[in-house]
Image (spheres, helix red, strand yellow):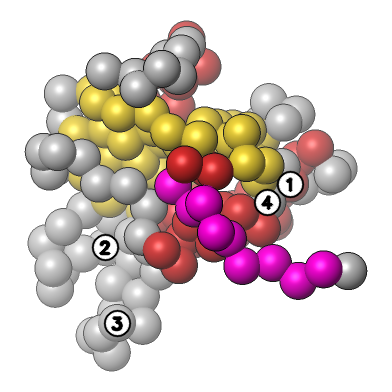
Amino acid sequence: MSDGIEITEYSLALLKEATKARAKAHAPYSRFAVGVALRTASGKVYSGANIENTSYPEGWCAETSAISHMIMGAESAQDREIAELVVIADLTPPITPCGGCRQRIKEFATPQTRIHAADLAGIQHSYTLAALLPAAFHLEG
């Protein structure tokens, strides 16, 4: 199910990368591994996994990890613009980014950025960022 958003070869490639990232999650407390892969406007791909900490909840969500990799690897403005993102976890129905991560994604995305929610069987739902975060916080400037 794509909720009206096309799932492309790029989406499926991101799913593979998100699945690989999920395998590297550090989730000894929740035992809930999450993986994310994102594609930038320039076509670069970055991934991340959730990283928990004994000082719960001071860990990082998978989206935060992927965005951090993107920022550190960016060489241009297009390298810092998220065009598409896949999040995967072992949960049906699949998870979407949490509220904080939606706002983090918004910092580097457009309202049309595609976000795909996957479980272990694959992409189950697709959304635009505008659909997931209709009243995003932003400072005029």
- The reply to whether discs 4 and 3 touch (Cβ–Cβ < 8 Å) is no
* SS at circle 3: loop
Q: How crowded is the residue under tag 2: few (<14 C-alpha within 10 Å), some, or many (20+)?
A: some
Q: In the rendered structure, which amino acid carries the disc numbered 4?
A: Phe
Camera-near label (2 vs 4) is 4
Q: Which span of residues is magenta-colored? A: 132-140
Q: Amino acid at mark 2?
A: His
Q: Earlier in the sequence, mark 1 or mark 2?
A: 2
Residue drawn 80% across the image and 37% down it: 78
- The answer to whether residue 129 is above or below residue 65 is above
Which residue has dot 4 on it?
Answer: 108
Q: Would residue 134 be counted in the magenta stretch?
A: yes
- Residue at image mark 3: 57
Going from N to C along the chain, the mark reached first, 2 or 4, is: 2
Pick the front one: 10 or 102? 102
Instruction: For the N terminus, give its image quadrant.
Output: top left
Q: What's the residue at 82%, 68% (across, down)?
A: 140
Q: Are marks 1 and 3 in contact (CB under 8 Å)?
A: no
Asked whether disc 2 touches disc 4, contact meaning CB atoms under 8 Å apart, the reply is: no
Estimate the spatial distance between the alpha carbons at disc 3 and disc 2, rounded to whole Å: 13 Å
* Residue 55 colored in magenta in the image: no
> Which residue has dot 1 on it?
80
